[in-house]
Amino acid sequence: MAFEFKKPVNLAYLLFAEPWVYLTFGTLAALFALSYFEESNIGTVYVAFLFVDFVAYAFLKPQYNFFSVTRNSLKAAGIAIAAYVIFYAVAGLLVGSLQAQAIGIPGSQSVALEDRIATATLGSSSTIPIMSSGPVLAGLPLVTVVVFGVFIAIIETRFFTRVLEAIGQATKISFSLRDWRTYAAIAFTSIVAVVFHFQAKGVTNDVDLLVTFAFFFLSMLIVVWTREIESAGYLHMINNVAAVRHVIKGLTG
């Protein structure tokens, strides 16, 4: 196992690069698994995600790491911001179109785009404390933002990148944007993410799941395009922070 310390060291590197992410995120994720998500097993799932990512990084020589390309954090942040704008527009088109088609169907209702994105990416009230008005959210709003906006965003991005890499290794895909198999692998990875959000996070609405698929498809596409995880990680952080802020605003008025 070889850990590389890159210079110059910046804040992004101290927060997200290997091995720091395993030391800090691993410890904190374990604590949240026991306390923050006390009413569900979702915290344990995220600890397992991080462990899988660690094993892949330490022993399997993954193709993509958070800082595979160095000294480009500002560019990566810019890509993430642009990607969020694209995702928001795509989600708006999907939600608007599908909700319009559902008008007149018994039991159907119109839901705001921000609510759709929040549910699609954070989860339902039955599994995620953020979506309820219980004491966890009421007492620790800043911690909630950090948990969902930073920890969960980075852990999910890293884990599903490992899933994409595993598919590539199994099918011998070189991940070229000119190869249709790359898009097939990205789509399959996105489906895995959708299944996770359905099974573990309680996202059951078809529109919400389609938004989930679109988000992870764009995230994994960015990983392949940039040849690293950094931009996709920032995209996930921007999306989750925006979603958490929307939920907190709705609960607190």
Image (cartoon, rainbow, N blue to C red):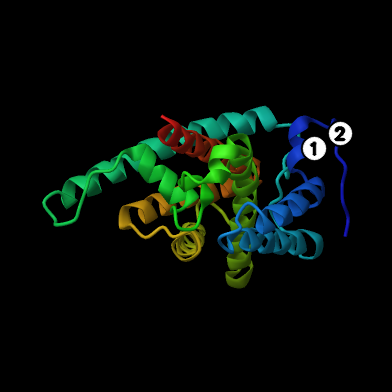
Type of amino acid under label 1: Leu
Q: Position of residue 60 (x, y in %)?
A: 76, 65
The residue shown at (73%, 45%) is 68
Q: Pick the residue in front: 30 or 89.
A: 30
Q: How many marks?
A: 2
Callout 1: helix, strand or loop? Answer: helix
Disc number for residue 45: none
On-image quarter of the N terminus: bottom right
Disc number for residue 7: 2
Q: Pick the residue in front: 34 or 49.
A: 34
Q: Nearer the viewer, mark 1 or mark 2?
A: 1
The residue shown at (36%, 52%) is 208
Mark 1 touches mark 2? (CB < 8 Å):
no
Q: Pick the residue in front: 85 or 50.
A: 50
- Ranked by sequence position, the earlier of labels 1 and 2 is 2
Type of amino acid under label 2: Lys
Q: Is residue 11 visible?
A: yes
Q: Is residue 174 visible?
A: no
> Looking at this rendering, what residue extends furthest in the front direction?
135
Q: Position of residue 211 (x, y in %)?
A: 39, 49
Please say if 245 is above or below 154: above
Callout 2: helix, strand or loop? Answer: loop
Label 1, label 2: how far apart the Cα atoms are? 11 Å
The residue shown at (49%, 31%) is 82
Q: Residues within 10 Å of mark 2 (few under 14, many from 20)?
A: few
Which residue lies under the disc numbered 1? 14
Q: Position of residue 38 (x, y in %)?
A: 61, 58
Q: Position of residue 175 (x, y in %)?
A: 58, 56
Q: Residues within 10 Å of mark 1 (few under 14, many from 20)?
A: few
